[in-house]
Image (cartoon, rainbow, N blue to C red):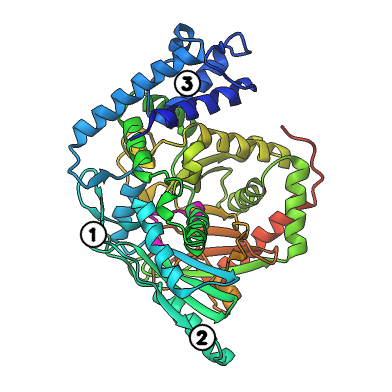
């Protein structure tokens, strides 16, 4: 359950961000620069973050932060109590979030494994490492849970779960033997979890020398997203260092629990505040004909989507740096630049300039959510009407506007589109979009206490399959999925995962080359300053 301190912290952060000043209990919203428009935006953000359904008019009744804080606490407590009563959650379990519920369903189709592949430089004791993993899982209930079917599914913490990492000492072996062992560890991570009976947490430690190690393994998206992997590694080091000093990790600051977010999101979905988001998305998707499709280039030969294939293109560090410099000069993100280039490519290939594709959005609300291990990333349909975006600046502005939409409604569950918003009503989740764009920032190396952790790409270990792409023989959910991520050497890895029963690899390779060319065309355009 959300604590009073968490509610106060969240509200204060949002007030300070809106007003641009420090906020005390006697700070009057309207005397410090707030107006009716900013009140509407603030209430929308708070309702999304805390699962409340406050009206902007209530801010006029309680304009001082202290009075507003008391009002907010009352509303938040009522929403949480109502949700818990309706859910009738058995002891030892908690409700799953809507994001987890989606992944629980997809796990039945053997989807959702998350690769873990880190290089550790520095001393690492095998026994302490195993003990640190044990404490890590105790600190984060989501890392030691299984899941029970239901509506909603429930998360059950396995109190006696103990991770048992496979530890291999490869020191002194020939290079070929080391590579064989590393490849075997990576391939073991292809195994899928049964989330009803198995805690989805398997890691291995491979020691190459006294100061060179690899952490290899896999988890599941029902428990973590990409951001969470970096949090997990940071907390693992925090726990390990405490053990190294002879201290009890139980004395460390408690970790925020994902179950609190799940309750908050369920309260939001059950409250009246979700209707505002529905109306917004109804207006965004009004008149769109349906998901953008690409013409199949392979004659039908059976059931599609039974295996995946991919093609890869590397933008060398100098080309990648040019993309970053262009984005910085134009005051947009690298994600914006890459998505803009992908949209231009799709408009050319599909023959339509009113695109409906998918992308991944973040549901974290700031504050404790930025330290909370769990799944917050969810795919959402994205509409980009390129008819009025006839210059790079206008296209980037359109993409930025859509990203602000996602930020304002980040708690909104994709599944609600199937019940409430055209043209998605009555469809399946897999039918929301056929084309998907993902950009994964490579986490910065985590350094401290004489150790450095760097997330590796599988290609860094001589494996053919790039990190984060569909696993061999895994089912394809989309016709085409663009996955772009930063490599440690500064390059950008551009990848198209596709359904080989629908598209010829030579054709997809041509599209990928055209995508790279679109990126270059944008980069060589001289941007003007954009807001």
Tell me if label 2 and label 3 are in contact, CB under 8 Å: no
Residue located beneath label 1 in the image: 196
Query: Could you tell me which residue is drawn at 58 percent across and 12 percent down?
Result: 35
Question: Disc 1 and disc 3: Cα gap in Å?
Answer: 38 Å
The disc label shown at residue 271, or none: none
Nearer-the-camera pick, 33 or 9: 9
Along the line of sight, the residue nearer the viewer: 427 or 274: 274
Q: Earlier in the sequence, mark 1 or mark 3?
A: 3
Read off the residue under disc 2. Answer: 170
Disc number placed over residue 43 in the picture, else none = 3
Left or right: 446 with respect to 50?
Answer: right
**In this view, the mark in front (2 or 3):** 2
Q: CA distance from mark 1 to mark 2?
A: 35 Å
Q: Give the magenta-colored segment's residue range.
A: 219-227
Q: Residues within 10 Å of mark 2 (few under 14, many from 20)?
A: some
SS of the residue under disc 2: loop
For image coordinates 47% across by 56% down, the residue present is 232
Q: Residue at x 49, y 65 (%)?
A: 469
**Disc 2 to disc 3, C-alpha distance:** 57 Å
Q: Nearer the viewer, residue 383 or 463?
A: 463
């Amino acid at each position: 359950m959300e604590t009073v301190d968490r509610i106060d912290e969240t509200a204060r952060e949002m007030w300070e961000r809106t007003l641009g000043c420090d906020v005390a209990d006697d700070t009057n919203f309207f005397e410090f620069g707030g107006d009716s428009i900013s009140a509407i935006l603030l209430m929308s953000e708070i309702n999304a973050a805390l699962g409340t359904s406050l009206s902007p008019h209530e801010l006029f009744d309680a304009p001082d932060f202290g009075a507003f804080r008391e009002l907010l606490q009352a509303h938040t407590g009522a929403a949480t109590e109502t949700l818990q009563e309706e859910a009738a959650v058995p002891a030892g379990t908690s409700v799953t979030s809507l994001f987890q519920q989606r992944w629980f369903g997809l796990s039945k189709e053997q989807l959702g494994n998350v690769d873990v592949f880190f290089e550790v430089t520095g001393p690492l004791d095998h026994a302490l490492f195993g003990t640190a993993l044990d404490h890590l899982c105790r600190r984060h209930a989501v890392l030691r849970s299984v899941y029970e079917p239901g509506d909603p599914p429930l998360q059950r913490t396995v109190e006696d779960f103990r991770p048992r990492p496979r530890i291999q000492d490869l020191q002194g072996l020939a290079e070929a033997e080391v590579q064989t062992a590393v490849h075997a560890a990576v391939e073991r991570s292809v195994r899928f979890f049964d989330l009803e009976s198995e805690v989805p947490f398997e890691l291995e430690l491979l020691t190459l020398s006294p100061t060179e190690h690899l952490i290899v393994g896999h988890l599941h998206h029902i428990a973590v997203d990409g951001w969470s992997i970096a949090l997990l590694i940071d907390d693992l080091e925090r726990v390990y260092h405490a053990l190294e000093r002879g201290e009890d990790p139980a004395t460390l600051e408690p970790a925020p629990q994902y179950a609190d977010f799940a309750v908050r999101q369920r309260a939001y979905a059950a409250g009246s505040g979700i209707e505002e988001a529905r109306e917004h998305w109804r207006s965004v998707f009004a008149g769109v004909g349906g998901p953008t499709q690409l013409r199949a280039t392979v004659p039908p030969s059976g059931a599609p989507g039974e295996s995946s294939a991919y093609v890869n293109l590397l933008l060398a560090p100098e080309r990648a740096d040019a993309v970053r410099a262009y984005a910085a000069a134009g005051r947009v993100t690298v994600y914006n630049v890459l998505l803009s280039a992908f949209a231009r490519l799709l408009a050319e290939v599909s023959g339509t300039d009113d695109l409906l594709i998918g992308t991944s959005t973040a549901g974290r609300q700031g504050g404790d959510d930025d330290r909370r291990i769990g799944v917050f990333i969810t795919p959402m349909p994205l509409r980009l009407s390129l008819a009025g975006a006839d210059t790079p600046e206008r296209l980037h502005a359109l993409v930025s506007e859509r990203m602000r939409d996602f930020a304002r409604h980040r708690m909104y569950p994709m599944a609600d589109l199937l019940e409430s918003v055209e043209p998605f009503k009555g469809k399946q989740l897999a039918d929301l979009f056929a084309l998907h764009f993902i950009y994964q920032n490579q986490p910065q190396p985590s350094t401290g206490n004489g150790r450095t952790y760097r997330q590796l790409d599988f290609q860094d270990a001589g494996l053919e399959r790039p990190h984060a792409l569909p696993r061999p023989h895994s089912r394809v959910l989309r016709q085409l999925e663009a996955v772009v991520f930063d490599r440690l050497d500064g390059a950008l890895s551009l990848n198209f995962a596709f359904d080989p029963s629908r598209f010829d690899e030579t054709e997809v390779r041509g599209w990928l080359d055209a995508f790279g060319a679109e990126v270059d065309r944008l980069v060589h355009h001289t941007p003007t300053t954009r807001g």
